[in-house]
Amino acid sequence: MYHRLAPVTQSNPLLPGYQFGAWLVAGLTPINADGPLDFFVDRPHGMKGYILNLTVKGRGRIFDGDAAFDCEEGDLLLFQPKTPHYYGRSPDSNAWHHRWVYFRPRAYWSDWLSFQDEVQGVGRLHLPEALRGEFDRLFASIENTHNSGRRFAEELAMNLLERLLLRAVEEDPRSHQQVRDSRVIEACQYVTSNLAAEVKIEEVAKHVCLSPSRLAHLFREQMGVNLLRWREDQRVIRARLLLQTTQEPIASIGREVGYDDQLYFSRVFRKRVGVSPSDFRRRSLDAHDALVAQETWYVPRRANE
Ligand code: FCB
């Protein structure tokens, strides 16, 4: 009944074949019966990152067979990475419009990345009517901010996304989110304020009055990753920001975030981000130029010009 389009290389994220290599992509998919988007999204191996999906009109059908369920206006879904995606307009509805954000999360978001009501890797939260406007606006601001071409566009979009996730967890009636241990928070702060230094776990542990093994255990339990891995994430996040927003030489950015050896810095960066620091900087600049050019292109000319 539904046709699947053959995957091709694609520049439109609404069509099959688009490569989601980025850290954040947001959009609105307005599916209308027999319209050009009226097919089932079919990604049997899921995606590398998470997807949040908010139904704003009509009904969607998620999965087929026994696991199938429908989502309706106000349903917020969270797809875990590598969870199969199979969804489209529900046959009972003549439309399914949904907003979505694809993202690779910050390390410390891990506690907020599962809803209590989950079917095969897809969490579901039904938002009461009074909250729908707020969530709809947050999705829209993430998309607009991310595409704005502003200097901190991606950081600001991630910041709005963090708010969205927190609000979702706050509204999740069945979530008994653990409150993070204050010593773990303190350890994060200590590591962040000494980002470039090779602080040892013993030193952090002493600072927060725990034994090294107790801290290691508690940190892993609450943050989902070990302390060194978490610090590496923070270093890469900081380096990305400096590459995007300053003209500092790459070697000094590396040093600033704790890597004296530039080759090692490039290796870690490439492993985490997928491209080298210089390629990352070039691509950010190109993306920025393209957006500025596009904005100029679309500026309506006044009659007297
Ligand atoms: C679009 C889909 C949307 C979401 C993004 C990542 O093509 O319409 O639901 O899956 O891809």
Image: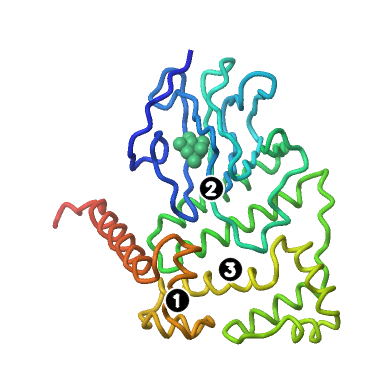
Q: Are marks 2 and 3 in contact (CB under 8 Å)?
A: no
Numbered mark located on residue 98 in the image: none
Amino acid type of the residue tagged 1 in the rendering: Leu
Q: Residue at x 70, y 37 (%)?
A: 124
Q: Which dot marks residue 48?
A: 2
Residue type at the position of mark 2: Lys
Cα–Cα span, label 3 and label 1 = 14 Å
Which of the pair 97/79 is nearer the observer?
Answer: 79
Point 69% across, 43% down: residue: 131
Quadrant where the image shows the C terminus:
bottom left
Please state which amino acid type lies under the numbered disc 3.
Asp
> To which quarter of the image does residue 173 belong?
top right
Q: Marks 1/2: CA distance?
A: 25 Å
Q: Label 1's element?
A: helix
Residue 236 x, y percent position in the rendering: 52, 71
Q: Is residue 230 above or below residue 49?
A: below
Say which residue label 3 marks.
Answer: 233
Give the spatial CA distance, label 2 vs label 3. 17 Å
Q: Position of residue 290 (x, y in %)?
A: 28, 58
Of the two numbered discs 2 and 3 on the same chain, state the one appearing first in sequence. 2
* Occupied quadrant, residue 200: bottom right
10 Å crowding of disc 3: few (<14), some (14-19), many (20+): some
Residue that label 1 marks: 242
- Residue 132 screen position, x and y as percent: 65, 41
Q: Residue at x 65, y 18 (%)?
A: 65
Local packing at callout 1 (Cα closer than 10 Å; few below 14, some 14-19, many 20+) is: some
